[in-house]
Structures are given as structure tokens and as C-alpha cells.
Image (cartoon, rainbow, N blue to C red):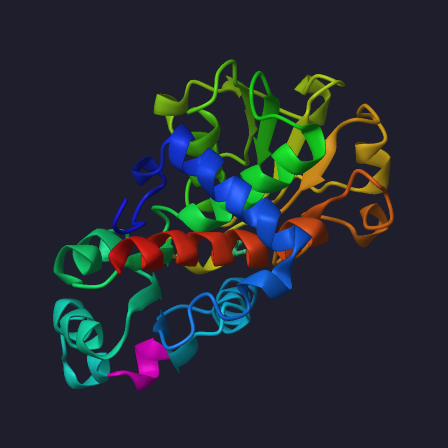
């Protein structure tokens, strides 16, 4: 794997290798403090981000590499002068050893990787995908459950414009025995290609579900005039499920996830966000060492 543009670029073998490196980083982070010293990584963000950008930048710094960054690239980068994405990437490839990019267009990552002469990592491309989120999500499930096979998972929320649930489903489908359920507001349903069992309410979800993956309604991506109410998870809803059910969310949350869930040991979304560091460190190491 030279670039990570889509979750489909991953395989079970690559994932297992990434997870093992992430495990090692978690155990002994100091050992990796200079692993990428002398390298420079660009973080280009054309869409808002807190977790993804900050955890990538922290991961880069923790590996001893430097950063060149454009946080608000849609307004601040040369795109405002009319430069194409392809030209920006070709030029950035001359300055840095790897590029991490978030962009509002669905095909942006594939287009950028096609012209990048250094490893390219997709940090979210429109509603199409968010492969590094799916890596940290899967890593968190594996860390707690001990495996990724034979999981019973329900994805909830905006399954049409949200990119995280789609990416996670694609990743978990690489493992055997996934049983997938979906609960979405009308108009924001999951694509048929995923063959999920459709739920109409929380009551339709089996009590012993392994993972509830809640997501935000992507208001910024909804066509004008389209409104949707989320299926809100509160502590009372969570208490209908087994003590082994994990409650996950890529964050940021709005009103779909009540704060009264936070103190429940099954709520793992902050641990999930924390795992963005070792998993992104592992990915940077894997791609940059391969490129040497
Ligand atoms: C998600 C995203 O950007 O797709 N956030 C993240 O990266 N953790 C989810 C969202 O914005 O709803």
C-alpha cells in the first residue's frame, strides 16, 4: 500500500500489521519518538476538523517529524486563486514526505493520490469515505472485544451523507461473520449494497448487539430544505442493551448522543478518539518507511 485513499485500499493483512504497530506504540511510545525525524508531513484541511487534524498533527510530532499545515485550505490556500487540486498536490509533493488531506469533494482523495509523488492519506473526502477513522474505530473494537470476527453491529444516524459508518462497514466486512443492522431517519438510509437488516426504532435492535455506532446528521451536506431528526441515544436507551454492548461515536456529537451516557463504561467514544494517535502513528510509519 503506497497511499491510503479509500477503506478498500486496506486488507486484513495490512490492518493486522497496523494494529500490531499501534499496540507497540501504545506500550512504549518513547521508542518511536525519533522514528520519522527529518521528515516533514503536510496536513491540508479543506473542511472543518478538530480530532482528525489535531490527532494527525500530534501523531506526526510524536514520531519526531515536522509539519506544514493549512487548516482552512478552502479559504486560505491557492485554490481561492483558481489553482486545481492536482496542481496543489503536485507542488506539495516537492516540499514534503507525505500528505494528509481532508476535502469536501467525494473524488478528491483518489484524484490527489493519482498525482502525488509522496504517500497520500485521506483524512475524509466528502461523504465518500474516512478510512483512518475506520482504522481507529476497528482498533478500538478489537482492543476491547479481542477480535473483529462475527460481530453484530448497528450503525445509527445519517448513513447517507456520513462517511464514517460507511467506511467502518467496509472495513469490518473484510472480517468474517459480520451481522449488520441499520437505523436511519427517512431519506438518510444506508445504501442497499451493504445488505443491512433495517431497523425502524431502537426496539428492533437485538439486545446483545456488540456495537452501537451512532453518527451525527451531516447538516452541512443535506440538500437545501431537507431536515431530519436523529434517533437520540440516552442512558435510558443504552440500558436496554447488554452489559457487553459498546457505544461508539466518531464525534463531534450534537443532540444524537446524550451526555448522560458518558459515565457508562460501555460508552467508549473518548477512548476511540484517543486511539486516533497510535493508529495514525502506525499508518504514518508504515507508509513513510515503505517510501524510503
Ligand atoms: C467525522 C467526520 O469528519 O466525518 N468526524 C471525525 O473525523 N471524527 C464525523 C462527523 O463530522 O460527523
Residue 160 position within the rendered picture, expressed as x and y whole percent measured from the top left: 42, 40
Q: Give the residue drawn at x 77%, y 43%.
A: 267
Residue 40 position within the rendered picture, expressed as x and y whole percent measured from the top left: 35, 76
Q: Magenta segment: does it hold 237?
A: no
Q: Give the residue drawn at x 35%, y 74%.
A: 39
Q: Give the residue drawn at x 28%, y 59%.
A: 120
Which segment is the magenta one?
72-77
Horizontal arrangement in the rendering, residue 74 relative to residue 166 (left or right): left
Residue 226 visible in the snapshot: no
Horizontal arrangement in the rendering, residue 6 relative to residue 257 (left or right): left
Can you say which quadrant of the picture contains the N terminus? top left
Image quadrant of residue 33?
bottom right
Q: Majority secondary structure of the magenta segment?
A: helix
Horizontal arrangement in the rendering, residue 201 relative to residue 224 (left or right): right
Horizontal arrangement in the rendering, residue 58 relative to residue 132 (left or right): right
Q: Residue furthest front?
A: 31
In front of the other: 259 or 227: 259
Residue 235 position within the rendered picture, expressed as x and y whole percent measured from the top left: 84, 40
Can you say which quadrant of the picture contains the C terminus? bottom left
Residue 290 visible in the snapshot: yes
Placement of 276 over or under 197, stated as above or below = below
In front of the other: 238 or 133: 133
Placement of 281 over or under 238, stated as above or below = below
Tag count in the figure?
0
Amino acid at each position: 500500500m503506497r497511499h491510503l485513499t479509500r477503506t478498500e485500499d486496506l486488507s486484513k493483512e495490512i490492518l493486522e500489521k497496523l494494529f500490531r504497530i499501534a499496540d507497540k506504540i501504545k506500550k512504549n511510545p518513547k521508542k518511536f519518538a525519533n522514528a520519522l525525524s527529518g521528515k516533514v508531513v503536510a496536513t491540508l484541511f479543506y473542511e472543518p476538523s478538530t480530532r482528525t487534524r489535531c490527532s494527525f498533527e500530534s501523531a506526526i510530532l510524536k514520531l519526531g517529524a515536522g509539519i506544514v499545515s493549512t487548516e482552512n485550505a478552502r479559504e486560505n490556500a491557492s485554490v481561492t486563486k483558481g489553482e486545481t487540486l492536482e496542481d496543489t498536490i503536485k507542488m506539495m509533493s516537492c516540499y514534503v514526505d507525505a500528505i494528509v488531506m481532508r476535502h469536501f469533494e467525494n473524488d478528491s482523495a483518489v484524484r490527489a493520490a493519482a498525482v502525488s509523488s509522496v504517500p497520500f492519506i485521506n483524512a475524509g473526502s466528502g461523504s465518500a469515505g474516512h478510512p483512518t477513522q475506520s482504522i481507529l474505530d476497528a482498533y478500538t473494537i478489537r482492543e476491547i472485544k479481542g477480535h473483529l470476527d462475527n460481530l453484530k453491529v448497528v450503525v445509527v444516524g445519517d448513513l447517507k451523507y456520513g462517511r464514517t459508518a460507511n467506511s467502518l462497514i467496509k472495513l469490518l466486512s473484510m472480517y468474517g461473520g459480520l451481522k449488520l443492522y441499520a437505523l436511519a431517519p427517512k431519506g438518510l438510509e444506508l445504501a442497499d449494497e451493504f445488505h443491512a437488516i433495517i431497523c425502524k426504532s431502537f426496539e428492533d435492535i437485538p439486545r446483545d448487539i456488540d456495537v452501537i455506532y451512532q453518527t451525527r446528521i451531516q447538516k452541512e451536506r443535506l440538500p437545501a430544505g431537507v431536515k431530519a431528526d436523529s434517533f437520540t441515544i440516552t442512558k435510558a436507551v443504552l440500558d436496554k442493551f447488554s452489559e457487553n454492548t459498546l457505544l461508539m461515536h466518531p464525534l463531534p456529537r450534537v443532540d444524537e448522543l446524550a451526555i448522560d451516557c458518558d459515565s457508562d463504561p460501555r460508552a467508549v467514544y473518548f477512548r476511540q478518539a484517543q486511539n486516533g494517535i497510535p493508529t495514525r502513528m502506525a499508518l504514518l510509519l508504515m507508509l513513510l518507511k515503505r517510501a524510503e
